[in-house]
Amino acid sequence: MFDLDRWIEIFETIRKNKLRTVLSGFTIAFAILLFTLLFGVGNGLLHTFEREFARNSMLSIYIYGGKTTKPYKGLQSGRRIRLKNDDLSYLTKNYEDKMLGISPTMTRQLQGVYKGKQNSYSVRAVYPSYQVLQSAEIESGRYINTRDVHNRSKVICIGRLVEKDLFGERSGLGKDIFLGGISYKIIGTFSDIGGDREERVIYTPFTGFQKIYGNSDNVEGFGLTYNPKMSVDEAIAFGNTLERDLKEKHNVAPNDQRAIRVQNYAEGNRQVSSMMFGLNIGILIIGIGTLLAGVIGISNIMVYIVKERTVELGVRKALGATPKSIIGMIMLESIFITTISGYVGLLVGTTVLRMIGDGLEKYFIVNPSVENYVVVGATIVLILAGTIAGFIPAQRAARIKPIDALRGD
């Protein structure tokens, strides 16, 4: 129940002991400030890892053909291994239950032209399932669909920066542009957290593009997404199985490392997970150390405050104050100062992170920030510490006889 007289008394005590209050508050605010900055910078490093690996799904595997470096089954080394459309059928037939989707790929660097504006862009011919492999998010229109592939439609989905290059602030949706001298209709635009490079990419249906630029059944590579139910070890084993079986299909020596190249993001996922786990542990240890320093600081201050007020507490007891009311007053004052100071530390910390955020990118720290619940939790820890730190000496002081307290011993 709200007791106005008690709060008036607390504010009066704070007013009469400004230096003591400021020192107590500074200890708490500085602990929360340091905690916020450390966690913010740590999260910035985590965001850097996430951004660097966000260009592709962490569940993706890419397969490319290369040149043999070893003779095998009477075939000489130096053969070019060309993946073909029937490899897509082979992979789909044998591993459909282990894949969420698979897409052949073909890439060309083409000149994009629209009404006198032009630039060079990477054009990727893919199937609709390729969208899962990338971090592309549709901003307007749509992505390539199955009908586009079946009809070999000359349609494209362009990156945000392609649209900006050719159309400025206007929308490019529904417009026709020339790529390599051939007209294509824009059916969608996308953004990509992978960065500017990925937002200057153009996607088009694989079938029509293969006929124009390949006029054969050759495929430059495959991109597939494996079943997320697989563990990291199972996904790595799956990638090794794909490599082994494709080598056997194309008569490649099992120990030839360049003929069939399989890029499995599960391996990178394991390394990134290990690094992020270690970074999180390091941040947690530093954060706990910071909080412990704050807990020790507020505890020492509370012990000093109670000792300093021994005479005052004796007078209160002599005038009829109960031990319960004395303990409650000290604890309430402690909680109030800790809460306000913790909020100030949080406010200053988040403000500093926002001010210096952009300048830290050159140190590989992206978007340094900290979740509010983390700092609120840390503040609650300090409040509890301040409460306990105030309770123990207050309880001891409340047991002192008034005559002993008045002597100042």
Image (cartoon, rainbow, N blue to C red):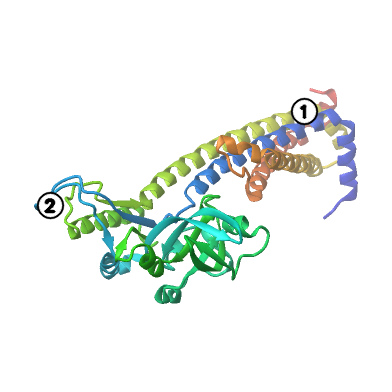
**Horizontal side, residue 257 vs residue 59: left or right:** left
Which quadrant of the figure has residue 383?
top right
The residue shown at (37%, 65%) is 210
Label tally:
2
Q: Which residue is mark 1?
A: 307
Q: Which residue is mark 2?
A: 75
**Horizontal side, residue 317 vs residue 288: left or right:** right
Q: CA distance from mark 1 to mark 2?
A: 91 Å
Camera-side residue: 359 or 160?
Answer: 160
Percent x, y for residue 258? 25, 47
**Of the image marks 1 and 2, the number of the one nearer the N terminus:** 2
Quadrant of the drawing holding the N terminus: bottom right
Is any part of residue 38 visible from this angle?
A: no
Residue type, numbered disc 1: Lys
The residue shown at (84%, 53%) is 2
Q: Residues within 10 Å of mark 1 (few under 14, many from 20)?
A: some
Disc 2 element: loop
Camera-side residue: 353 or 198?
Answer: 198
The residue shown at (31%, 54%) is 64
Which quadrant of the figure has residue 93?
bottom left
Which quadrant of the figure has residue 118?
bottom right
Camera-side residue: 86 or 60?
Answer: 86
**Horizontal side, residue 305 vs residue 178: left or right:** right
Q: Compared with residue 7, is residue 97 higher up or lower down, i.e. above or below?
A: below
Percent x, y for residue 407? 84, 23
Percent x, y for residue 379? 68, 43
Is any part of residue 406 visible from this angle?
A: yes
Q: Residues within 10 Å of mark 2 (few under 14, many from 20)?
A: few
Residue type, numbered disc 2: Leu
The label nearer to you, 1 versus 2, is 2
Q: Compared with residue 63, is residue 8 higher up or lower down, i.e. above or below?
A: above
